[in-house]
Amino acid sequence: MMAKLSEIIVSIPPVWRTVFLLVCSNCFMTFAWYAHLKNMAGKPWILAALVSWGVALFEYLLQVPANRIGYGSFSLAQLKILQEVIALSVFVPFSIFYMKQGIKLDFLWAALCLCGAVFFMFRK
């Protein structure tokens, strides 16, 4: 069973494995960075930091393999821009649905700026 699963995973192109792992990593990152503002507002900051570090461990367990897999398919600069696009793509729904923040037009402008960054980093 595990051998079959690893064959399936290896058969997925590195670009898509990288993107998938970065999306998952960013979910943990976003919770580690911001969820304590909602969930632990009345707790001491050191407790919030320790809990956030615990959550961030899972971010790194996904992010490090993602970057290692992606480095063969992307340049370092492309990996960074990809990370930022994914981070914003994860952050906006998190802020709207989890943190109950309003939708702002600034999200659109930030996304357009990132589209420009993607264009310049990925053009041949």
Image: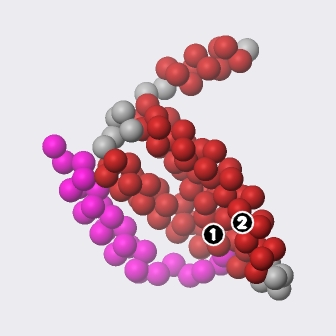
| Residue 112 part of the magenta-drawn span | yes
Q: Would you call the spot at circle 1 few (<14 residues within 10 Å), some (14-19), or many (20 or more)?
A: some
Structural distance between the alpha carbons of marks 2 and 1: 7 Å
Q: How many marks?
A: 2
Residue 64 in the image: x percent, y percent?
A: 54, 44
Q: Amino acid at mark 1?
A: Trp
Left or right: residue 55 versus residue 94 is: right
Q: Residue at x 49, y 20 (%)?
A: 11
Residue 117 among magenta residues: yes
Q: Amino acid at mark 2?
A: Ser
Q: Nearer the viewer, residue 11 or 46?
A: 46
Q: Whole-percent x and y of residue 31?
A: 67, 64
Q: Which residue is mark 1?
A: 33
The residue positioned 81% from the left and 82% from the top of the image is 44
Query: Residue 48's spot in the image, x, y percent?
Result: 77, 74
- Give the residues in magenta: 99-124
Q: Residues within 10 Å of mark 2 (few under 14, many from 20)?
A: many
Residue 51 appears in the picture as rendered: yes
Q: Would residue 15 be found to the left or right of residue 77 on screen? A: right
- Occupied quadrant, residue 34: bottom right
Q: Which residue is mark 2?
A: 52
Kindly identify the residue that appears in the image at 47 percent across and 43 percent down. Answer: 67
Is residue 89 visible from the viewing direction of this image?
A: no
Q: Are marks 2 and 1 in contact (CB under 8 Å)?
A: yes
Location of the N terminus by quadrant is top right
Q: Earlier in the sequence, mark 2 or mark 1?
A: 1
Residue situated furthest bottom in the rendering: 42
Q: Which percent across, then down, holds residue 81? A: 36, 56
Q: Which mark is residue 102?
A: none
Among the 4 quarters of the image, the one containing residue 47: bottom right
Q: Is residue 118 above or below residue 14?
A: below
Image side of residue 36 versus residue 11, left or right: right
